[in-house]
Image: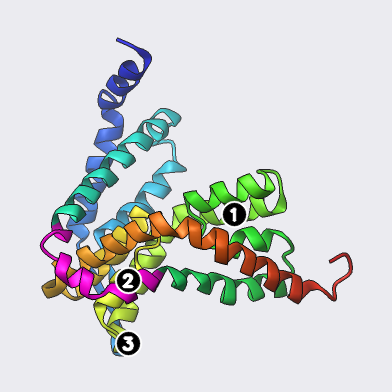
Amino acid sequence: MDGNENSLAGIWKDWRLHAIVLGIVIVTELIGTFKIPVGPGVILLLPMLYALVIGLGLFFSPVVKEKQSKNAEPIIVLGVSLLLAKIGVIIGPSLPEVIAAGPALLLQELGNLGTILIALPVAIWLGMKREAVGMTHSIGREPNVGLIMDKFGINSPEGRGVMAMYIFGTVFGAVFLGLISGLLATLTPLSPLSFAMASGVGSGSMMAAASGSLIAAFPELESQIVAFSGASNLLSLSTGLWVSIFIGLPLTEKIYARMTRNREGY
């Protein structure tokens, strides 16, 4: 048995990890879904959101040790793989509807440029410097981290900025999208499918949280929501890096240079 097989066997034999996960699942399912009315809209609190918060809290407690933390990483990949398989099965029958959305779905990646037009000026006004370029040129998932590291280096201000957003998105991204998607979908007159497309930001956990809230609010559209969010996420993963290379990062650099040209040293 080689090292990889030993490591895999160790993961499956880590009963402490499995017991913690099972306990979190049972507790969160018993709590169930809560709906908090906000005007004409509603904030949906789903079991997945409770699980993220409880898991994060346990990570900083003696209950979860370093061994469980390391063993959990490859299991997350397995869980996301099952999610993607389910999405693939659902996309098939819904393919005509996805194709009919054509231009909107293809152009949805341009929506991620909103981080530049909105977040970059705010970051500069708050006094941030070159870190703002790494933080706001995209939503800051794995491909964009690689882009910034390749262009500027890991120890650069831009590198620190993109890593800060990557970590923040990993910890809080799913919670934020899970809350905001359900609220906006019930608060605005926009189609729930538009929010399903917007949930595909290149992160499986964020997409799952957002689409879960949408399904809870519009259960009759479950198959369409899963299909649109899955197709959108796939497009973000496949085209998002190119949009960042040719549009996002150059645009961020230009706006940053223009907004800081009168500052000393820029």
Question: Circle 1 — which element?
Answer: helix
Q: Name the residue carrying label 1.
A: 162
Residue 172 is a magenta residue? no
- Answer left or right for 192 relative to 175: left
Tell me, yes or no, if residue 87 can be seen here. Answer: yes
Q: Which residue is depicted at the point 89% across and 69% down? A: 264
Please say if 82 is above or below 67.
Answer: below
Q: Amino acid at mark 1?
A: Val
Q: Amino acid at mark 3?
A: Thr
Q: Residues within 10 Å of mark 3 (few under 14, many from 20)?
A: few
Give me the disc on residue 188: 3
Of residue 99 and residue 175, the one placed in the foreground of this image is 99
Q: Name the residue carrying label 2.
A: 105
The overriding secondary structure of the stretch rendered in magenta is helix
Of residue 73 and residue 225, the one placed in the foreground of this image is 225
N-terminal label among 2 and 1: 2
| Residue 157 coordinates in the image, percent (x, y) | 71, 53
Q: Quadrant of the N terminus?
A: top left
Q: CA distance from mark 2 to mark 3?
A: 20 Å
Of residue 4 and residue 232, the one placed in the foreground of this image is 232
Q: Which residues are magenta?
A: 90-108
Q: CA distance from mark 2 to mark 1?
A: 26 Å
Q: Amino acid at mark 2?
A: Leu
Q: Which residue is depicted at the point 22% across and 41% down? A: 22
**Residue 255, located in which quarter of the rendered image?**
bottom right
